[in-house]
């Protein structure tokens, strides 16, 4: 089963949206394999957002991501990376479709509630950036019969 990283950004923490967003992922059938709160710093964010360090808005993004502690979560499931990105929606909350997390909770291109890994390569790199190996748990639901068909497992 695929694993992916979600970060509840300071916008989710400040607006007390974490519980209902976790509920969405659980209702979908994704499984929580890791979860913790942490304070991000500039060094970690320069790695995580390496593709954006030269952009004009990067200093604002740094401030935004360090404004409060964040909650990082590892979700597991069939095609979890794609599924979580679809549930997250377009980067700018004003463009994100209703029904997605950003579409329902964000009016901003920066304060957009969650980060979600965008490819299998990114997911592996990001999970090892934010979690120690022992913080990700290889447990699974005992009864998966109503989440996936046998040929999907
Ligand atoms: N971002 C921003 N302004 C922009 C583009 C991105 O502040 O014009 C922020 C926004 O918080 C976004 C993050 O930088 O979520 C990472 O950008 P990316 O293009 O990787 O989008 P994502 O993968 O989060 O949809
Ligand atoms: Mg991205």
Image: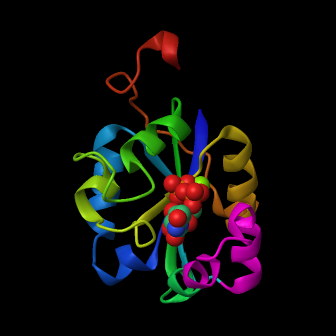
Residue at 29%, 67% (x, y): give it.
107
Q: Quadrant of residue 30?
A: top left
Using residue 36 as the reference point, say whether residue 134 is left or right of it.
right
Specify the segment rendered in magenta.
41-62
Q: Is residue 36 left or right of residue 29?
A: right
Q: Nearer the viewer, residue 13 or 153?
A: 13
- In the rendered image, which quarter contains the N terminus? top right
Of the pair 108 and 24, the residue shown nearer to us: 108
Q: Is residue 34 visible?
A: no
- In the rendered view, does 140 fall on the left or right side of 134? left
> Is residue 91 covered in magenta?
no
Is 132 located above or below residue 79 in the figure?
A: below
Q: Position of residue 38 (x, y in %)?
A: 58, 81
Whether 141 is drawn above or below 14: the answer is above
Q: Is residue 17 left or right of residue 144?
A: left
Colour style of the rendered protein structure: rainbow
* Along the viewing direction, whichever of 46 and 15 lies nearer the viewer: 46
Look at 55% across and 83% down and name the residue there: 60
- Furthest-front residue in this view: 56
Please tell me whether residue 54 is drawn above or below residue 134 in the rendered image: below
Res. 112 in view: yes
Q: Indicate the position of residue 71 as horizontal and vertical percent values.
A: 49, 73
For the point 53% across and 31% down, which residue is it? Answer: 79
Q: Magenta span: helix, strand or loop, mainly?
A: helix
Residue 132 versus residue 5: which sits nearer the camera? 5
Q: Position of residue 17 (x, y in %)?
A: 28, 70
| Residue at the image position 22 percent from the left and 47 percent from the top | 98
Q: Please provide percent x and percent y for residue 23.
A: 28, 55
Image quadrant, ligand 1? bottom right
Q: How many numbered tags mark residues here?
A: 0
């Amino acid at each position: 089963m695929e694993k992916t990283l979600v970060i509840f950004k300071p916008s989710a923490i400040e607006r007390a949206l974490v519980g209902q967003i976790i509920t969405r992922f659980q209702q979908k059938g994704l499984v929580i394999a890791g979860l913790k709160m942490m304070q991000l710093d500039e060094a970690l964010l320069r790695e995580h957002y390496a593709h954006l360090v030269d952009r004009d808005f990067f200093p604002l993004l740094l401030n935004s991501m360090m404004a409060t502690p964040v909650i990082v979560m590892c979700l597991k499931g069939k095609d979890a990376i794609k599924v979580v990105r679809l549930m997250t929606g377009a980067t700018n909350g004003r463009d994100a479709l209703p029904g997605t997390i950003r579409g329902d909770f964000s009016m901003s291109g920066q304060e957009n509630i969650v980060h979600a890994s965008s490819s299998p390569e990114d997911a592996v790199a990001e999970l090892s950036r934010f979690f120690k190996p022992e913080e990700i748990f290889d447990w699974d639901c005992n009864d998966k019969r109503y989440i996936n068909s046998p040929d999907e497992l």
